[in-house]
Image (cartoon, grey):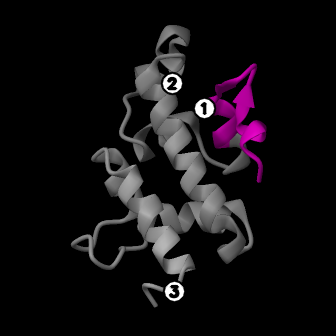
Amino acid sequence: MGIAQYADNGVFAPRRIAQALQTTSEEIARTVGLGKDAIQRKDRINSDRTQRRLREMVEILNKVEPRFGSPLMAYAWYRSEPLPGFSGQSAMQLVKAGRADDVLDYIDAVDAGVHA
């Protein structure tokens, strides 16, 4: 699933992401560590923090989607699968803690065969 599918006029659109993942915008906000306001008010949707968190989740989902065969399965993995080496935290928990780069590095390491 391409990144453009989640965007609206060059800005990540929570409602488009929610639609693609068959969930609500509020749930998307929670899965990236944002409040309800961040995805409802236009000025907050366009803020650097909101856009960064949405981009991080979309990047992670795009990286793992080929592994799982669908965006929905990738989203389920993102939300619930504990990652080895991260004290049982899921990708979602790490993104909420501002550690999306660690998740992306982990995925790259798995793809390179470092973690099996």
Mark 3 and mark 2 residues within 8 Å of each other at the beta carbon = no
Q: Residue at x 68, y 50 (%)?
A: 22
- Identify whether 92 is placed above or below 23: below
Please give the range of residues in magenta.
1-18
Q: Quadrant of residue 73?
A: bottom right
Q: Which mark is residue 37?
A: none
Amino acid residing under circle 1? Pro
Estimate the x, y position of residue 110 in percent, counting from the top left.
50, 79
Estimate the x, y position of residue 3 in percent, counting from the top left.
71, 43
The answer to whether residue 13 is magenta is yes
Mark 3 and mark 1 residues within 8 Å of each other at the beta carbon = no
Amino acid residing under circle 2? Ile
Residue 37 horizontal side relative to residue 3, left or right: left
What secondary structure is marked by label 3?
loop
Question: Residue at label 1?
Answer: 14
Q: Residue furthest bottom?
A: 116
What secondary structure is marked by label 2?
helix
Mark 1 and mark 2 residues within 8 Å of each other at the beta carbon = yes
- Sooner in the amino-acid sequence: mark 3 or mark 1: 1
